[in-house]
Image (cartoon, rainbow, N blue to C red):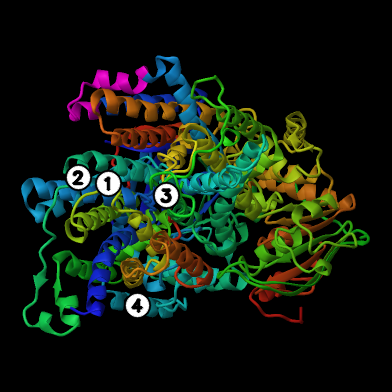
Amino acid sequence: MRLVLERRADRPTWLVVASPLIAVALTLVAGAILFALLGKNPVAALTAYFIDPLSDGWALQELSVKATPLILIGVGLILCYLSNNWNIGAEGQLVMGAIFGGSVALATHGVPNGPWVLPVMLAAGALGGMLLALVPAILKTRFGANEILTSLMLVYVAELTLDYLVRGPWRDPKGFNFPQSVSFEPEATVPLLVGGGRAHIGFLIALVAVVVAAIVMARTLKGFEIRLVGEAPRAARFAGFDDRRTTWFVFAVSGALAGLAGILEVAGPMGQLQPTVSPGYGFTAIIVAFLGRLNPIGALIAGLFLALTFIGGENAQIMMRIPLDVTRVFQGLLLFFVLACDTFILYRLAVVRQETAA
Amino acid sequence: MGIFEAILLTIITAATPLVIAALGELVVERSGVLNLGVEGMMIIGAATGFAVAVITGSTLLGVLAAIGAGMALAAIFGLLALGLAANQVATGLALTILGLGLSGLIGAGFIGAKRDPMAKIVVPWLSDIPIVGKVFFAQDPIVYFSVVLALGVWWFLFKSRAGLVLRAVGESHGSAHSLGLPVLRIRFIAVLFGGACAGLAGAYLSLAYTPFWSPGMTAGRGWIALAIVVFASWLPFRAVIGAYLFGGVTILQLHAQARGWPVPSQVMSALPYLATIIVLVVISGVRRGGTQAPASLGVPFVPDR
Amino acid sequence: MATGPLLQAQGIVKRFGALTANDHVDLTVGRAEIHALLGENGAGKSTLVKILYGLLQPNEGRLIWDGASVTIPDPANARRLGIGMVFQHFSLFDALTVAENVALSLGPETPMATIEEQVAELSRAYGLPLEPRQEVWRLSVGERQRIEIVRALLQNPRLLILDEPTSVLTPQEADLLFATLDTIKAEGRSILYISHKLDEVRRLCDQATVLRGGKVVASADPRVETAASLASLMVGAAVADVRNAAHEVGEVRLEARALSLPAFHDHGVALADVALTVRAKEIVGIAGIAGNGQDELFAALSGENTTRADAILVDGHEVGSEGITARRRRGAAFLPEERLGHAAAPGFTLTDNALLSGHATNGFVTGSIIRNDRVANWVERVINTYDVRMSGTNPPAKSLSGGNLQKFVVGRELMREPGVVVVAQPTWGVDAQAAATIRQALVDLAARGAAVLVISQDLDELFEITDRLAVISEGRLSPAKPTRELTREQVGLLMGGVHGATS
């Protein structure tokens, strides 16, 4: 007797909704086991991770701050992954957005400027991310170079570029040799949602991105094209779509969104350029895309949840001396469980009594 | 010791982990599976290997533990990507994220710990030959092993029946299944082999190359190993050449930095990554009609009944 | 023991979920007998032979081999018993050599050098020329089939199963195959011959078992039956004949002039100087063995690959440099050979698949917003007009049977009343009823004034519905001649690459 996968005749709707929830539940169980192995009280640790950060207004604001880049990038990656374009270099595109947008802030620093600075910064940030993302897209369509590897390699290049800039030409001369730029002026800083708080308008931009992407994917020919190129590239050509253009489009959009996330990060919570501008949002957003079932609305929820793991991780480190790496373990496990649960939407396990061919 | 000899020696140490990891992934991909989790398996090997070696005081036990850790992560990948036919790209990414996190947990207590690098096996007489003597005959055991591994993988793939079966499975899992070949079992074993190699490559980093543990110390080498497999057109000896080319780029930029070339260090540090991109472009653009990727690469297989 | 039948299958039942593919099937194959297994697509032939070869396990029933009850858990066991199989879709490995392909089906004990010798020897003995060290992707379809046969023969089988072996061969290649099969039979081996081509079954086989809807409906001696009587056994009802009567034709609506196109990939064939015209009310056929440039020709005519502007004309307009969408707007419609993955996206619903080819021409999109209501109405009309059967409302394309999906795809294109139609393999793998419906639809469309070009490997089909016929071979197209003036032998020679005239 053994277990085999059997293709389901249809996709049960309840499973489509339940599968990410089951994955989250399994991750929590695995997390409890992990905490026990680390010698921590699992209940207290899970509380510190997932409950405490939701318990006060400050923490909720922080949640929106952390969720903003995850949602923005996740939405872009959804377009990529649906069209079978494996952009995993969003982290680098985020950094390039920070560099491009930051350059505007630095260029206008200390000279008369106005309210136009921030919009220009955001546009420049989006442009920076877009340009970096177009490199793997063009290398893929023109030379057939694997976009997974090229986009990832560019992450290192972008990070080293930022590192060079803030240690070299862009270093604050009055900064006691710390590797960081000057602090951005108020005109170059993202307005807050609530006075004195942490939440900024970036979260609203992320919500707009979610709504636009949801409409594009559900109702427009462009969304149809993106899905079709991913599902059946030959049929997409038959439909009259140029899959190379689709590749450029999704890379450009996802790069722009990642770049936007980058400039929002430095013009928001950070207020200056530093050697590291992201705790790995670009990689975590990959999980956001999958946990959100490659659906923009899903990415909104998944982005909030994964933001929780970041905040919970910091909280648990302070409260219970749990290493920050646990957050990454959580995220990795979560992606595993999401993928495993997805299998059961398409297949079900069947017991075979008879010995059969392997 | 002359500068030339020194450079050769350091190139070998820089290339060896790439050789081992790339050969492992090459076998995996020849069986039709794309495991993008090399980076994760490598770093967990580095952390586990170093931790066990410090605790037990035995480099050998450290190496074995690293191999075991790499295989354990590979087994998770196999269960998901093969057993549950999950998307291989996403599963490989999950493996990398998980490996990075777990390695941080395992290595946390060992940051700052020091060990002597792995002992070298010095062949008497031969190692006294000028210039090449030290390079070829005074290396640590893993360097010698990487050469044996390359020969072994080549012989296995192209001279043994089991290798023929593995290539057939990677070429067309449907045809292999209809001939009665156990597709999933063969692939699972290949994935485990890839995990063992990645774990060993990681152990080499923390036990011979540096030799200490620092978080994120693989620094993208797992990804470069994946690129080397593409560069090598899935041929073992070309993978060795590719690994040594990348090792060379890494070392040259280190030497250039040490000699104070008037180029920002970040530019030099970016060279291996830029070289990877350029090589991928050139290889992908040039390769027409030559050895292609295994036809079933990355395609999940679910046998019908 | 040695006198009874070689193989008996008794009461075989195989279910896939709700579907019963084999419903208490009995089959008896005698010694030194060529036994035909007849049936339409979906009748259960493939399921039955997969059970005999150990690829599937029956839910009920038993197998008796050489007088003893056996179970066949996997193909290795089948081969050990003496059962060999030649698949319709070859189970070959393109990147491996002929000898390596053969080695994979043998035990590990035989060294490669021995295998190479044996391959050479067998291919001489049975008239199946093969070069052991060639890589498979370099070989023609006929040569690939020879590998399968040699591979099966090397194991010295007592029963050889062949699944639709002539569907990929020219008439001349088929004759060679029949000679080989007679040799095999003369050695005392049995052959289970799966086919739906009645003429060759009557010519070759000693016994026939007819399957329909998963059940055995008849056992017959094909040499005393007529093709018509076998056909009605197979289909269960007489299939209406599609006839294309002599008629007037109109203006040229589709034309190719000196059309050349490089091969798509290593395994493709370049088009060389193809010239072709199709007039209003006319059906022109293009015969040829798969892989002789049909894919490239279809892509060039449809606009999936663009070329010189004046190389292709639709209703007098130079469209060679236009894409497929622009050509659709000019009133052309295209039906590719592959249904799943080319004509239709497998995982997409029928409405999405209607949008796939109709987004520019059918008013499905205003601004860039998809009008779901209009698409749904259109799909409903296609389903009703072409009698597309399916389960559920708006299911994914891959859940439809081959015949029903093809009716949907044909309906999707023809409901637009296109002036020019290019169709490849319109009835490949489609049951007889659906095939008749599709052919009739093409004939009717032409009668209403459209120009129809049919690219097909099915000579029966081409002789049935076309007015003129050309042959494509190695990327070159022979001049089209009136179908009535052609014989199968002439067409077969052209398919084999013997060009009577320059193209």
| Residue at the image point whose x is 39% and y is 79% from the top | C120
Classed neighbour count for the residue bearing mark 1: other residues with Cα under 10 Å, few (<14), some (14–19), many (≥20): some
Horizontal relation, residue B98 to residue A72: left or right = left
User: Which structural element holds mark 2?
Assistant: loop
Which circle's residue, 3 or 4, is located before the other in the chain?
A: 3
User: Which structural element holds mark 3?
Assistant: helix
- Residue B255 higher or lower than A295, as above or below: below
Per the model, the C-alpha gap separating discs 3 and 4 is 28 Å
Same subunit, tags 2 and 4 = no
User: Which structural element holds mark 1?
Assistant: loop
The chain identifier of the residue carrying mark 2 reads B
Viewer-nearest residue: C314 or B116: B116
Label at residue C116: 4
Is residue C313 inside the magenta stretch? no
Per the model, the C-alpha gap separating discs 3 and 1 is 54 Å
Is residue A49 inside the magenta stretch? yes
Q: Which residue is mark 1?
A: B215
Residue C84: image x %, image y %?
38, 60
The answer to whether the residues at label 1 and label 2 have Cβ atoms under 8 Å apart is yes
- At label 4, the amino acid type is Glu
Horizontal relation, residue A284 to residue A186: left or right = left
Image quadrant of residue C132? bottom left
Q: Which residue is mark 3?
A: C50
**Closer mark to the observer between disc 3 and disc 1:** 1
Q: Which residue is mark 2?
A: B111
Same subunit, tags 3 and 2 = no
Classed neighbour count for the residue bearing mark 4: other residues with Cα under 10 Å, few (<14), some (14–19), many (≥20): some
Residue A205: image x %, image y %?
60, 31
Classed neighbour count for the residue bearing mark 2: other residues with Cα under 10 Å, few (<14), some (14–19), many (≥20): some
Per the model, the C-alpha gap separating discs 1 and 2 is 8 Å
- Residue C148 higher or lower than A349, as above or below: below
Same subunit, tags 1 and 2 = yes
